[in-house]
Image (cartoon, rainbow, N blue to C red):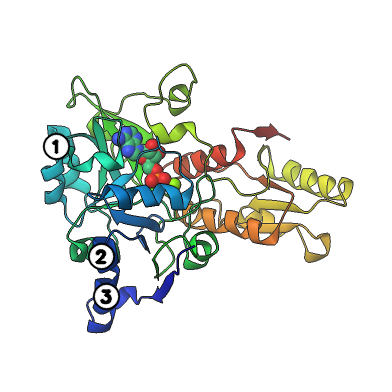
């Protein structure tokens, strides 16, 4: 068990001497091979020096992450990516158009320097976060930072400091508590065709940078669920694992609003000894009152997809804190960032959608 130093940072004023001092201390921990939890615009990350084998090993241990699930390496500026990875022409255009961004590129390694983040692969996942605290920390550390989400493996990702403290207190050297994550979902991950990298991209994981935003780059019709087929090696190693799961089983309900409401109310009456969680939109939460003893959490308005993305992991973590026995969820729209919300809920449910 480590003694974890928990500090608060004012993300709006990171260049003030006091805040800079805190980031310098955190950067010192990274340089000395320690683990630091830090805010990014996607979710909080658990970071270590990507060039230090022992430090990267600590990330896997702290999270209980399977050793064949590679890590994303974070840079403070896009120019540094070129030092460690082969940037093909399409990747170059994407970097120029988007970075810094909640977008990760899987590129061929240029030299062995980033081997520890993806030991058995000839590719490495790289990203420049948009969040200024994250970029400043990387700059001060003077080294690329390997960082997965700062949660125990398989659990919902952390979007606020309190989620992390319950998962990682005692497992990291420092936790930097900043603001709630602006986006709330992990980065979009894209890869390139190894034989012809300029011939289109694959979306390995959906996120804030949507299919629509990437449409000019010739997206291959690569279906994630196909890659998940046990007979094929997964294209994105992480997708073979159960992910984002709250403690209770989660089922997605598909049907009209009134049918969903009837279903939940009936389940509640028929299962008096079970605490039911209901993940819904604002328009549905109005139909339930406290006396029913159902834990109702809204993701926001049905048509506000960004708000749904931002609230999703917070809601799943809240169900864990309440201690529900089962979670029923509405089926979100698959438009734009809705695709990413849908993808996380499908993973959390193990693909279980029930028609009502
Ligand atoms: P996380 O760090 O938990 O947000 O997950 C990072 C995601 O990127 C996982 O799904 C990984 O499998 C994926 N990833 C990381 N490195 C690579 C790589 N070299 N090739 C393909 N996917 C990768
Ligand atoms: Mg993760």
Pointer 2 local density, CA inside 10 Å: few below 14, some 14–19, many at least 20: many
Mark 3 or 2, closer to the camera: 2
Q: For marks 1 and 2, give the CA distance.
A: 24 Å
- For the point 19% across and 26% down, the residue is 197
- Asked if marks 1 and 2 touch (Cβ < 8 Å), the reply is no
Q: Is residue 215 left or right of residue 349?
A: left
- For the point 42% across and 36% down, the residue is 238
Q: Position of residue 26 (x, y in %)?
A: 30, 69
Pointer 3 local density, CA inside 10 Å: few below 14, some 14–19, many at least 20: some
Residue 63's label in the rendered image is none
Query: Label 3, on which residue?
Result: 14
Q: Is residue 220 left or right of residue 4?
A: left
Mark 1 CB lies closer than 8 A to ligand 1? no
Residue 111's label in the rendered image is 1
Query: Which numbered disc, 1 or 3, marks the residue that appears first in the sequence?
Result: 3
Pointer 1 local density, CA inside 10 Å: few below 14, some 14–19, many at least 20: few
Q: For marks 3 and 2, give the CA distance.
A: 10 Å
- Asked if marks 1 and 3 touch (Cβ < 8 Å), the reply is no
Q: Is residue 312 visible?
A: yes
Q: Give 353 or 88, whichever is nearer the viewer.
A: 88
Mark 2 CB lies closer than 8 A to ligand 1? no
Q: Quadrant of residue 6 in the image?
A: bottom left
Mark 1 or 2, closer to the camera: 1
Query: Label 2, on which residue?
Result: 137
């Amino acid at each position: 068990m480590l003694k974890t130093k928990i500090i608060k940072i004012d993300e709006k004023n990171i260049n003030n001497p006091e805040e800079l001092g805190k980031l310098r201390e955190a950067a010192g921990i990274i340089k000395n091979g320690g683990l630091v939890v830090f805010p990014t615009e996607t979710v909080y990350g658990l970071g270590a020096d990507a060039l230090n084998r022992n430090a990267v090993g600590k990330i896997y241990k702290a999270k209980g992450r399977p050793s064949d699930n590679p890590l994303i390496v974070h840079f403070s500026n896009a120019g540094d990516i070129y030092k460690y990875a082969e940037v093909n022409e399409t990747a170059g255009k994407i970097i120029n158009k988007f970075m810094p961004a909640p977008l990760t590129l899987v590129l061929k390694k240029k030299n062995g320097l980033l081997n520890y983040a993806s030991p058995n692969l000839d590719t490495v996942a790289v990203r420049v976060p948009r969040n200024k605290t994250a970029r400043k920390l990387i700059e001060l550390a003077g080294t690329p930072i390997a960082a997965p989400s700062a949660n125990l493996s398989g659990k919902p990702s952390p979007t606020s400091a309190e989620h992390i403290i319950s998962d990682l207190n005692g497992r990291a050297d420092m936790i930097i508590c900043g603001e709630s994550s602006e986006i709330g979902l992990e980065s979009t991950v894209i890869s390139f065709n190894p034989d012809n990298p300029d011939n289109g991209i694959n979306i390995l994981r959906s996120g804030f940078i949507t299919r629509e935003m990437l449409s000019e780059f010739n997206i291959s019709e690569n279906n994630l669920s196909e890659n998940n087929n046990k007979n094929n090696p997964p294209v994105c190693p992480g997708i073979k694992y159960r992910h984002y799961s709250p403690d209770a089983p989660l089922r997605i309900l598909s049907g009209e609003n009134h049918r969903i409401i009837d279903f939940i109310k009936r389940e509640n009456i028929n299962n008096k000894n079970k605490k039911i969680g209901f993940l819904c939109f604002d328009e549905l939460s109005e139909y339930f009152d406290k006396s029913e003893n159902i834990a109702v959490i809204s993701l926001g308005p049905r048509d506000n997809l960004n708000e749904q993305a931002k609230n999703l992991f917070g809601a799943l973590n809240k169900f864990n804190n309440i201690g529900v026995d089962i979670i029923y969820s509405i089926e979100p729209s698959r438009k734009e960032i809705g695709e990413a919300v849908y993808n996380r809920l499908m993973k959390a449910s193990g693909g279980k959608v029930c028609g009502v």
